[in-house]
Image (cartoon, rainbow, N blue to C red):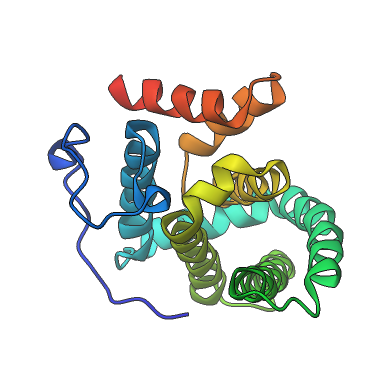
Amino acid sequence: MTFATTERPDETNLTLDTSAEPSAGTTPSEIKTPVEARTAVVLEAGRLVAEADAAPTERHARAAKLVANGGLIVINIADLLPLLDERIASLRGANSEEGKAELAQYHHLKSELERFRAATVGVVIGNVPEEDAVEASTSFLGGICDWWSECHVQICSQTFTASIFLGCLGLCELAGVAPGLSAVLSGALIGGKAVPEALRAAAEMLKK
C-alpha cells in the first residue's frame, strides 16, 4: 500500500457541513450521519498526519512508541488474527459481490496485521530499521482509514465488524499514529454502549 506524501493538515480548518441534503441519486448506504461524517474527518486527519514526512526526532518518537508498546501490540494482533481466520473461513465460496468484497477486505486486513506485527517485533529486537517500522504502522492506519471510508455503514451495523475495527483503532493508538479517537470509541464500547453511542462519544470529543 503506497500513499503520496502530503503536508500536515491545519486542524483549525477541518470543518465539515453535515447539514446539507443528500444529492439526487445518492443511495441510503452512501448517506453518512453527522457522527459518521465527523469520525471520517478525524480518521482522514490522522491519516494525513501519519503520512507526512516525519522529522528524524518525530520518527524516532514513533519508533520508541512501538518499542514501548511492542508486547501489547503483538498480543492484540494475536487476539484479532483467529477472529479474522474464522470470518475468512466462513466467507470462502461466497457467490455475492458483497461477500467477495468482504472476503477480500479481511484477507487484506490480515496481511496488514501480520506485516505490522513483524515490523513491531523487528524494531523491538533491532532487526528492522525505525523507518520501516514506522512506515508499516502508517500503512496500517491508512488501510483502516480506507476501510472506514468504504464500509462505515457495515462497521456501524455489524457487531463483529465493529469489534474488529475498534481493535484495529486500538492498535493505531498503541503505535502512536492515531491518538485520542480510538480511546474514546473503545472506552465507550467496553463500557457497554452500542456502536452508535460510541461514535457519538467520539463526536462529543471533537467538539472540545
Residue appearing at x 84%, y 67% in the figure: 90
Horizontal side, residue 187 vs residue 131: left or right: right
Residue appearing at x 47%, y 22% in the figure: 201
Q: Percent x, y for residue 91?
A: 78, 70
Q: How many marks?
A: 0
Horizontal side, residue 193 vs residue 1: left or right: right
Say which of 141 and 54 sits in front: 141
Residue that lies at the very extreme toward the left in this rendered image: 13
- Which quadrant holds residue 32? top left
Residue that lies at the very extreme toward the front in this rendered image: 25
Examine the rendered structure and indicate whether residue 25 appears above or below residue 197: below
- Which quadrant holds residue 206? top left
- Which quadrant holds residue 35? top left
Examine the rendered structure and indicate whether residue 193 appears above or below residue 107: above
Horizontal side, residue 81 vs residue 181: left or right: right
Examine the rendered structure and indicate whether residue 10 appears above or below residue 106: above
Residue appearing at x 78%, y 62% in the figure: 84
Examine the rendered structure and indicate whether residue 33 appears above or below residue 57: above
Q: Percent x, y for residue 9?
A: 20, 51
Q: Percent x, y for residue 16?
A: 19, 39
Say which of 203 and 3 sits in front: 203
Say which of 204 and 26 sits in front: 26
Residue appearing at x 38%, y 59% in the figure: 50
Q: Percent x, y for residue 183?
A: 56, 32
Q: Quadrant of the C terminus?
A: top left
Does residue 128 appear in the picture of this structure?
yes
Horizontal side, residue 201 vs residue 72: left or right: left
Does residue 176 appear in the picture of this structure?
no
